[in-house]
Each structure stands twice: as C-alpha cells, then as structure tokens.
Image (spheres, rainbow, N blue to C red):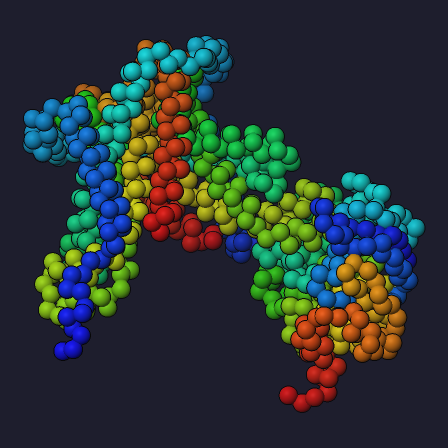
Amino acid sequence: MVGLDSHPEEWARYTPRQRMQRFLIYLFCIAAIVWSLTSINVIWEWVYDAPEQMGDLFSRMVPPDTRNLGTILWVLVETVNIATLATGLAVIVSLPVAYIAAQNTTPNALTLWLGRFILVSSRSVNTIIWALLFVAIFGPGIIAGILAIMFRSIGFIGKLLGEAIEEIDRRPVEALEATGASRFKVILYAIVPQVMPVFWAVSILRWDINLRESTVLGLVGAGGIGLILQSAIDTFNWQEAATVLLAILALVVLGEIVAMALRRRII
Amino acid sequence: MLKISKLVKRYGKGDPVLKDLDLEVHSESIVAIIGASGAGKSTLLRCINRLVEPTSGTIELNGIDLTALRGRELRAARRRIGMIFQSFNLVDRLTVMENVQSGRLGYIPLWRAVARRYPKEDIRKAYELMERVGIAHYANKRADALSGGERQRVGVVRALMQNPEILLADEPTASLDPKTSAQIMELLRSLSRELSLPVLINIHNVAEAKAYSDRIVGMRYGRIIFDAEPAALDQRAMDEIYAGIPAEERGEAGDAAALQVQPA
Amino acid sequence: MSPTPDTWRRPPMISNPWLRYGLVVAVILYVVWAFSTLPIDWQRMSEGVTRAQRIFSGAFPPSFERSNLLISGFLESIRIAILATVGGVFLSIPIAFMAAKNLSPLPIYLLGRGIIIVARSFHPVIVAIIFVKAVGFGPLAGVLTLIVYSVGFVAKMLAERIEEIDWGQVEAMRAVGAGYLSTVFYGVFPQIMPRQIGLSIYQLDSNLRASAVVGIVGAGGIGSTLANAFGRYDYDFALAITLVIVGAILLSEAISGQIRKRIW
C-alpha cells in the first residue's frame, strides 16, 4: 500500500475555472427562468385550474360530431390543393432566385445581393404574417392563403437549392465550357442534373410542411380547413371541432406517409 | 496547326506561371508535355481553349488568333478544340449517350438539347465512335455506373464528337491503373492517326510519354527547356527537367512498357 | 452486322408507358382542376392593387412611436419562449424514454410515439386556439402551446438518439447491479446529454419564432401586439413590429447557431 496516500482523496470532474464557468451558465439560466416566472402576466389560479379546464373541454368533444363530415372532407381537399399549388408555384419562382443567390452562378454582385435579400425576407416572415398581409390586400379567401404559403416557401426552397448549387462538382462544368456550349446549355447539362436530387428532396419536404401550414390559414381568413375549425370553436360546437381536429391529424399523418413514399421512389 | 508565341500567364501579382512560352504543333502528331507539378503544364493547356485567360501573347489555331475572341466567337473556337480531363469530368447523373452528346452542345439548337432530341447524324456518329472505343453497349447506362477506364473512353468520345481540329488531354491517365492507362494512351495514338488529329497530352508518367508520343516537350517553371523526339530524352535531359524533384515523384516509376512484358 | 442506329431515346424514369403517360395526364388534370376550383374574383384582385398601395403607403415609414408597447410585447414573447422550452424539454425526457424502442415495452412505446405524432401533427396555431379557449387569452395559453410544440420536436429527436445509444454502457451498469433509475442516470443520460442541450438551444430559438405567431390568435406576446396593430389598420406600427420580429429571428438564429457550434 505504498504511495496510496499520495493520491488525492478528492476527485472532481472539472477544473475550478470550468466549474466557475458552469456555475455562471447555470446561474444565468436559473435567473432567466426566475425572471420569466415572476414577471409573466399570468393569473396563477388559472394555471392550477388548467388541467380541469382542459379535461372539461375534451369531455365536451366526445363523441365527435360527424354530421358535417362531407363538407369537412371537401374543405380538406381544398386545403391539400392550397398546399400543393402553392408549393408548385413556389418551386417555379425559387429556381431563378436560387440561381442568382448562389455565388458560383449569379451574374454579378448586385444580383447576388438581390437574391439573398429575397431569400432572407421570405424566410424570416412567418406564413401567418404573410397571410395577414395578403388577406388585407386581396380579401379573405384561398388566393391569400396560396400566396402566403408561396411567399414563405420561396425562401426555404431557394436557400437550400442555392446551397446545393454552390456545392456542385465544378469539373463537369469546366468540361462543358470547354466544348463551346453556351452558358444556358452548360447549366442545363452540368448543373441541373447535379442539383436534381436536392431539388426533389426539398420540394417534397416543403410540401409536407406546407400541408401542416395550410391547416391554419383559415384562422386568419386565408382559406382551408382552419376556417371550419374557427367557426366550430367560435360557436362552442366542440363535437364538430373534434371531427375537424381528427381530420387534420389524419391528413397530416397521411401527408407524411405520401412524402416518405415519394422520397423513396424518386431519390 | 497550333502556334503559341510569347505566352505569359500570371495569377494575381505573383511570379508568372508561364513565361514567354513559344510552341508549334503540326498536324497528326502526339506531343507529350512533361514536367514536375507546378511547371505550368495544366495552365498551358487551359490557356489554349481559354478556360484560363492568358495574360499576354498569342495562340493561333489554323490561322485564327484565339486570344482575341469574345463570347460567341470564343465558343465557336472552343468547339474546334476537344479536351480530355484527368478526372474525366463527366456528368455522373446523365446517361453515357447524354454525356457523349454534350460534346455537340455548341452545334445543336437549344430545344434539341432540352428535349434530348439529338440530330440523326449525331446519334449515328456517337454510336460509331462508342463502338470504336468499345462502350456502345453502355449508351443507356448512367455515367457513374462505369469503371474508370470506361469513363475516360466516354470523355474521349465526348471530345471527338466536337469534330475537333486538335485534342488537348490533361493527365488523361493519372486516375487510372497502369493497364487501363496503357489502353487509353494506345487509343489516343491510334485515333490521332485515323483522324489525322494533333494531340497535346500533359503527362506525369515519362515512360508512357516515351512509349506513345512522337515528340516530347519538357517544361520547368513556366518555360520549355526540352523539345525533341522521345529517343532524345536521355538521363541528362531528365535531370534538367526534374532537377531537385525526388525520384519517386518524377513519374519514372510505373514504367508502362515494362509492365506489359514483365510477368506479374 | 446491323447498321449503326441513328435514333436514341433517353430511358424513361418509369418504364411502363401506360403508367408514365397516365401520371402525366393525371398531374395535368389535377393542376387544371385545382386551379379551376379557385374562386378567383378578378375585380377583387384588381382592387387589391390599390389596397396594397394604401397599405404600403400607410406602412412607410414604420412607426416606432409606441415602442414601449412593442418592447413589453417582445419581452413577453421571450418569457413565453423560455418557460415553454424549460417545460417542454423536461416533459420530453420521459416521453422520449417511452418512445424509444430499445428501452420500452411495446404498449408504452406505442403510447409515446402516439403522443409525439399528435404533438407534431398539429400546427402550434391550432393548439393555441384550443388553449386560448380552455385557459383564456394571454401568455399562459402561449406557454402551454409551445410546450406541446417543443415536445413534438425534442422528444422525437431525443427518442431517436436514445435508440442509437451504445448498449454496452447500459449493460455495464446492469452488470454491477444498478437498478433501473441508476442505469438510466449513469448508462443513458451521459450519452444523450450533449444532444439534449443542443436540442434545447435550438428549441428556444424556434419557440421564440413560434411565439410571435401563436400570439396572433391570442396567446400573448409580440404576435398579439402585431395582430392588434393589423386589426386597427395601424400599418406603420405593424411594419415596425414585423421588422423587429425579423431582426430578432435573425439574431437568435445566429446566436443559437454559434452556441451549438461550440457545444458540438
């Protein structure tokens, strides 16, 4: 047992400096939480009451009322149409935007910044805020919904597509430039085939997201199933609201399955 | 005939990569350009079809000064210069036929390129050339499904589809195993004879250069310091071209001719 | 030997012609039909242009006059995001354990997955209007909504991470006779903690974004301020709010990206 007592008897995982850092981070997190808890404008009795309220609400939803199922399903189809048309249009518009927003294909610095400006402004404004704007301009309805989803999707698709263009293999491009092909034909033969897989993957992913987003457009008056949900809730018709919620759940789950199948087939 | 005079290429403000280079290539000969990496071989080749912009000097191909051309005229001139690359530079996700036909992109109208409706004579020519190099049965395969040697054959056919007046090959065998690379060199030599086409080959492997070329050009630091028939390339000339370069990087290893006779 | 072919067609993606053309026709019919069901009111659309003009001229320049309203709305959004992240992340840990195939018996696994699917499928705005009805307007509904939203994402990712853990470490804990909880704390937690911290920071960022949106249907925060401004046609104030939201989102995206880069 020689030398055993020369070993330290205390063991610590971190050096004092690391411990200090960790302590400060914990302190900051706890301070943020305490600040949020104490200053948030909440009546705490309501919080204790919340589980009961929720239980009460759900009990009023059963059994779901399916008398309006025909209308609900029809509007659900309309919702799918909004998502699909808007995704399709967004894909078409985002192609040139991605082209000018990618460093290696953009014609000049001005177009590069224009492209990036379009992408950032489209991406940072939420679909619902776009919908508020378009409802104010074109009035309530599907058109406002399609435009809202389209405007939000352009940034999403354009950004990912632009990054894919920036990551392509330069060598085939060089080879086709060497054959004397025009700029457009080089893009068509050397760049387009390389970004095709990303293009499909991104379009399918965005369609899946848009399906979800299109279910809430109606809450700000921009068409789709949300409109029925809103009116059912406003009239305290919870049994019909339950049917609508189940329909939305089925739609979204189905959409995810379709998207997964498409991805597997195409890519 | 290709005539390069006083060619200078300088990247940024540094030392020029090509210094007052003069070179003439006459028809139907295979010219191998050898030299250590960084000697300017690749830059020289890319200056000829203006993938790299020369700083000064002139490059004449059959009487036309290539350095003065812009836009449409430049593209028309590039059609007449076929190029083969070290890493083949095929479009992986397109079929072999589409890759081959991309050599005709400078000639065909846009709608044919978009719809893949290539002219009949182009398709016949493509099949003939693919048959000639032994890849006709791959026409409908995707380029990434082929082996290295087959991919380089596609690259060769793509260049020949251009009806070129000269062929440039930038290290065409550097990514291939010795056996395949000997086959590709053999192919380039016989095609040069059949089509009476001058071929300019950058090559790392001196043994291959000696075995397959009609003339060897040795480059060092942007200048041509050796220019004679292969037989004249003796040890003294080699030492001059590769002075200060470790033996294993001189490209003397992997002797292609020796490999063919020696049993494994 | 047969003559060289002079036609070529790109091999189609779907080889069965009936299926191929059937799909093309189906897609065209769908698009035509879908567009035809749109109730396009051209008169209303053309009025839209003048309305857009009015909105934009009303919006410029953005008005920061009621900046204290803006700041208090924004602080409320931050509080909602923080509390929802804490609640959501804590709640997502047991749910993730339930939904991990390698740790849970089948019925519990299915229950866990079910919770995640339901939480993920409903857009936060839908969850928000239900909570607003149940617990009233204000930030409480916002916090509850974003807890559900966080569970949908964090629990899903965490469950996937748990399914990938190194099983050897768990067996080592069992081998020394540790009980279920100590196995989880010493065998599983250390492996999933880095991911969980990264996910929490990411989720804080997305909760901040989402809190701006759920406010529009009455769940508190800057979104409520925005919806009010829009409802009262205060377009200059609405633009100011939107600009602040965009700025905050860009900022928080950058910060959370930086932190996650350091942790991983």
* C125, B254: nearer the viewer: B254
Q: Position of residue B89 (x, y in %)?
A: 65, 58
For residue C99, above or below residue A244: below
* C19, A33: nearer the viewer: A33
Seen in the image, is C180 located left or right of residue C84? left
Seen in the image, is A150 located left or right of residue B231? left
Which residue is painted at 23% across and 30% down in the image?
C80
Picture quarter containing residue B130?
Answer: bottom right
Q: Position of residue A66 (x, y in %)?
A: 20, 32
* A161, C161: nearer the viewer: C161
Which residue is painted at 60% across and 47% down in the image?
A191
Seen in the image, is C27 located left or right of residue A72? right
Q: Residue furthest right?
A: B63
For residue B186, above or below residue A224: below
Q: Residue furthest bottom?
A: B263
Say which quadrant the N terminus of chain A sits in.
bottom left
For residue C8, above or below residue A117: below
Picture quarter containing residue C141?
Answer: top left
Residue C154 visible from this viewpoint: no
